[in-house]
Image (cartoon, rainbow, N blue to C red):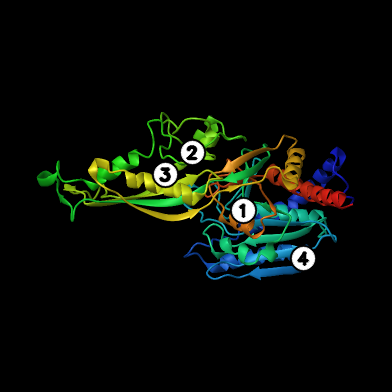
Amino acid sequence: MSHSTPHPSHVKSVRDHVQELMPQLTQDLANYVAIPGVAFPGYPPEAIQEAHDFVVSLLRAEGVTDIQKIELPNTSPAVFATIPGPEGAPTVLLYTHYDVVPEGNTAEWKTPAFTATPKDGVIYGRGTADSKGNFLLHLGALRYFGGKPPVTLKIVVEGQEEFGSAFDAYPPLAPELFAADAMIIADVGNIRPGVPTVTVALRGAATVDVEVNTLANPKHSGMFGGAAPDSVLVLLHALAALHNKNGDVAVPGLRRNEWQGTTYTAEEFRELAEILPGVPEFGTGDLGQRIWSGPAISVIGIDIPSVDRSLNAVSAHTRARLNLRVHPEQDVHEAQQALVSFLEDLTPLGVPLTVIPGEAGNGYAARTDGTAFKLLSGAMTDAWEAEATTAAAGGSIPLVNSLQEAVPGAEILLFGVADGFSAIHAPNERVVITEIENSLLAEILFLERLAETSAASNS
């Protein structure tokens, strides 16, 4: 098969070949989904090992011989395969993960969680979108090229991404292993089906605990209420100060700017967030800056007496845990300190707060001026026959920062088979079959074009 410079007829040729590959790939996905490989504590390790072995077997069936097992303490093994390309060709690292989150409430699934169930152009099942479907892109590309890609490929399939593991911090310890000109992190997806989307930013995240201590012990509310300082009321005043009357974050020093890419419509966001009728969204300004290029502070835990076990007593101690989401380009420790300082300066109802910073991880902002980014955007535009756009993800992917630290010269590209309505981590997770097909087409075109661009610049 000739892999010349892509043009409309070539794109059609590749698309036709991809469609021929799809029946076997969807069967592979069905077999893959049937393995309940959850890496959370308490789940059978045999299933995770089976998922690992399944990935290895599929790679070996395509003639891949250089397959390593990266084993780190207290984590599932990662698969690391190398497929050499022509001499002098660029190197592309392709990443995804084989573990999945638990199925959750089985009663809420319309189909069995670990049975890939096709219906109306989608496939339901845990892991179809996050992220077993993404492995099909790398596998399908190998099949398209007959095991002889135009670039050197390094395929990394992690086994404990959902729970977090030592692998997150491993790349800087072995930078030569991960050395590449470009990396595709296939663990995200399109803003909605049919809209090719490159994820170019991830918000940073930090935790902060706030404690209030007012009494040595709780006191009878009838005898002491009205003068004895209630720790719950103090904490509520403190939490209320974090946002203004519109729901915008009121903490100074947290970066926020307009979002330049695409985002959800207000109707889509309400549907995805399952906001109840009559309840307004928080904040002002465009949606993108509220969920991607601006800060967010959420109360993710609070220790106070429960209603069911409440007593007529003034509370002596209470605390809350805050989750801070940070602009992708702001240093997360700087932002965390801004929140800590803001809270420490408060004395709600005259009571000082105890503020304890917790874990923090920086966000990520991708380069959008590099060759690889432009080639992937063009490949996606051709694959979907729609102009590629950019979006962000509110969550962080620690491995991305680790890879950037290990290989600072590599362009890191985030895309994948999921879409905003895939219900990842939720009941009825699903992937759209045409999204797999177009994503695979885009990955093939990207690899071809990167090889040809490199060859032309070296000639």
Q: Are marks 4 and 3 in contact (CB under 8 Å)?
A: no
Residue farthest along the top direction in this orientation:
278
Residue 151 as seen in the image, left or right of residue 436: right
- Residue type at the position of mark 3: Ser
* Neighbours of disc 1 within 10 Å: few (<14), some (14-19), many (20+): many
* Neighbours of disc 4 within 10 Å: few (<14), some (14-19), many (20+): some
Residue 103: horizontal and vertical position, in percent? 51, 54
The residue to which callout 1 is attached is 131
Q: Secondary structure at mark 3?
A: strand
* Picture residue at 45% right of the left edge, 41% below the top: 253
The residue to which callout 3 is attached is 298
- Residue type at the position of mark 1: Ser
Q: Secondary structure at mark 1?
A: loop
Q: Secondary structure at mark 4?
A: loop
Ranked by sequence position, the earlier of labels 4 and 3 is 4
* Neighbours of disc 3 within 10 Å: few (<14), some (14-19), many (20+): few
Q: Nearer the viewer, mark 3 or mark 2?
A: 3
The answer to whether residue 426 is seen in the rendering is no
Residue in front for this viewpoint, 52 or 28: 52
Q: Disc 2 and disc 1: Cα gap in Å?
A: 21 Å
Q: Which mark is residue 64?
A: 4
Residue in front for this viewpoint, 220 or 453: 453
Ranked by sequence position, the earlier of labels 2 and 4 is 4
The residue to which callout 2 is attached is 273
